[in-house]
Image (cartoon, rainbow, N blue to C red):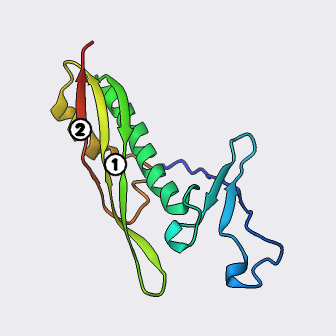
Amino acid sequence: MAKLHDFVSSIVWTGNRGEGTRSYKGYDRTWDIALPGKDVVHCSNDPLLGGDPARMNPEDLLISALSACHMLWYLHLASNAGIVVTGYRDDPVGHGETLPNGAGRFLSAVLRPSISVQEGADLKLATELHEKVHDFCFIARSVNFPVSYEPTFNVVAR
């Protein structure tokens, strides 16, 4: 039987310049993710839609969550398989589209982790583990677009 659980967040709009949404250009598309006991994350709209490029936007957060979830499950599966990972960095890319009416969506995502493994690691198995992650990763199992993997490995001496 599945175990049910909830995930919570707190989003606080910070873009009221004093007039609220009286006019379309009269407010900022900024907000904070502010949960008790955690660092505040200052966010904005996608820069293509007038957002602040220095702040995280929903699309950044989604692709980052997908990558982080994949990484955590990969590390778990690698550990179980006896593959010693000593470094992991991913530079994922999400491919999206925006329709003429402004509606957008992700079409696909590519995770491109660069993984350092200890000498003697089975690189074929290390590569195959990426496909197994999708069976477990909460985020990957929840998105409705394809996710592919292009891992590279760096073998380091023990």
Q: Secondary structure at mark 2?
A: strand
- Image quarter for residue 129? top left
Residue at the spot 30% in from the left edge and 28% down from the top edge: 116
Left or right of 66 on screen, residue 124: left
Residue density around tag 1, few if under 14, some if 14–19, many if 20 or more, within 10 Å: few
Q: Is residue 156 visible?
A: yes
Under mark 2, the amino acid is: Thr
Residue at the spot 83% in from the left edge and 73% down from the top edge: 18
Under mark 1, the amino acid is: Asp
Q: Nearer the viewer, residue 12 or 69?
A: 12
Marked residue nearer the N-terminal end (1 or 2): 1
Q: Nearer the viewer, residue 26 or 127?
A: 26
- The spot of residue 70 in percent (x, y) is 39, 44
Residue located beneath label 2 in the image = 152
Question: Where 100 falls versus 30 (above or below)?
Answer: below
Q: Is residue 81 visible?
A: no
Residue located beneath label 1 in the image = 135
- The spot of residue 109 in percent (x, y) is 34, 58
Left or right of 2 on screen, residue 18: right
